[in-house]
Amino acid sequence: MESFLLALSNLASGWVILCAFAGVLWGIFGGALPGISPSIAMALLLPFTVGMEATNALVLLASVYVGAEYGGSIPAILIRTPGTNSASATVIDGNEMAKRGQAGEALGISLMSGLYGGLFGLVVLVLCTESLAQVALAFTPAAYFSLGILGLSVIAGLSGGSLLRGLIAACMGLMIAFIGSDPVSGVQRFTFGSEDLLDGVKPILVMVGLFAVTEMLVQIGEPPWARGGSGSTRLKLPNWAMSKRLFKPQAIGAAIGTFEGVTPGAGGTVAAFMAYTEAKRWSKHPEEFGKGSPEGVAAPEAANNVVTATALVPLLSLGIPGSNSAAILLGGFLIHGLQPGPMLFQKAPEVVYGLYGGLLIANIAMLLIGLVILSPCMWLVNRPKPYLIAFILALVMAGVFAIHQSLFDCGLVLLIGLLGYVMRLLKLPVLPMVLGMVLGYMVESNYRRSLLISGGDHSIFVTDTVSAILLGLSAALSAYSLWKEISDRRKSAK
């Protein structure tokens, strides 16, 4: 109760409210820019949160996630160009409504569905996270090692449709995590004599490079944004009759978004397309889907906004981020010396409760800002690509240099961005690499601690009950991913 009251006092101070509104505003702008995902919008702000108070910084980053998921629907509906990956499903019926002069109605449905989804996801987050964390308190170092392996196997198996590519990317992340000093003996490793690498490669640099710089390099080689007619751009919120019709697809989106959000590696894009498919299956008017159905906008928007909260469940309770954006938020925790997981609720409960309150304010802010932000967003969406890319790259370099006033960090970010670009060309998924880097310390340090406890006996990983169960799940998931990949290839060969 004391921590809860402290969180309320933080909200009353006004800084959390300001951070929530600012984060949502930036997220909507970032999400409305084609090709700028929520994780990129968060990564751009990450360097500037270094000097902030922990609760304010985390609320700012989480609010960007909330705003970007809604912002991505604006260009999806108006110019048939999804601002975010998860808005791709919204394009199908949203743009068809815009072609019929119902752009304002489609944007209103998107806004309200996003609000309902975000609030529902927040309820799930509050009710489930701490209970799951209490179970995790019984974990031993061996169990934490196996949990890290489980996180890697889940992400590798669900990324890019290729188990091999996912494992390669995860190993690359682990290699980066091993740069620096040994967590037990302090011996220098893979520093190549550079003093700048003695402390290892900071997660923030890798995330900014992979998500922001890589995307800019990709966008440079692509044609300008598509333009198209959009009809009216004035928001029109659903009336009572339309709200009753949309209740079922919104409920379907909320249910699917909850499941996909708490499953590491699934994310809003999968949730949105699954919600769209199921909403069509259960609709009384399935023939309208693909031709401008309001239900086809409501279901995916509710689903991907639920994920903004439910993706934080495995992050806060187990320390395993379930999406790219959750991985960026994990970086925010690490910057402020906080390790997500069961001990977070004992060491810094006020931060967790403050984050809950900030997410509530962020969803309210999304509604208020969404009512007035459409025209500026449309102006930004239609800016020439060269100006946008130059501005974003300048912002990235300024933010990275501000962390340690180091040109080495700037060069490292550009190098990592180039690595991410090569990974795109080779179709290697980025998320397993990020998770490999983030979970690398957890896996290695708990592996070493377990062996110190057991006197070098590796059987500790199978004699510990929780560890054995988690390793078994890791093996099962990897085997399932391999079986599914082989099965899909056989089907495509026929």
Image (tube, rainbow, N blue to C red):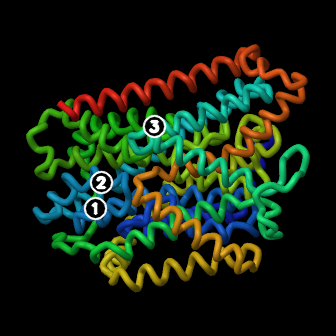
Label 2 vs label 1, nearer the camera: 2
Label 1 vs label 3, nearer the camera: 3
Left or right, residue 171 beside residue 456:
left
Look at the image and tell me in which quarter the N terminus lies.
Answer: top right
243 vs 426: above or below: above
State how many labels appear: 3
Is any atom of residue 120 visible in this view? no
Q: Are marks 2 and 1 in contact (CB under 8 Å)?
A: yes
Locate residue 406: give its quadrant.
bottom right
Residue at position x 58%, y 73% from top? 414
Task: Give residue 331's position: percent from left, percent from top.
Answer: 66, 56
Q: In the image shown, does 378 or 177 lie closer to the viewer?
A: 177
Q: Which residue is mark 3?
A: 163
Q: Amino acid at mark 3?
A: Leu
Look at the image and tell me in which quarter the C terminus lies.
Answer: top left
Q: Which residue is mark 1?
A: 76
Q: Which residue is mark 2?
A: 88
Q: Amino acid at mark 1?
A: Ala
Task: Give residue 93's position: percent from left, percent from top.
Answer: 19, 52
Q: Residue furthest front?
A: 192
Locate residue 332: give its quadrant.
bottom right
Residues at marks 1 and 3, CA–CA distance in whole angstroms: 31 Å
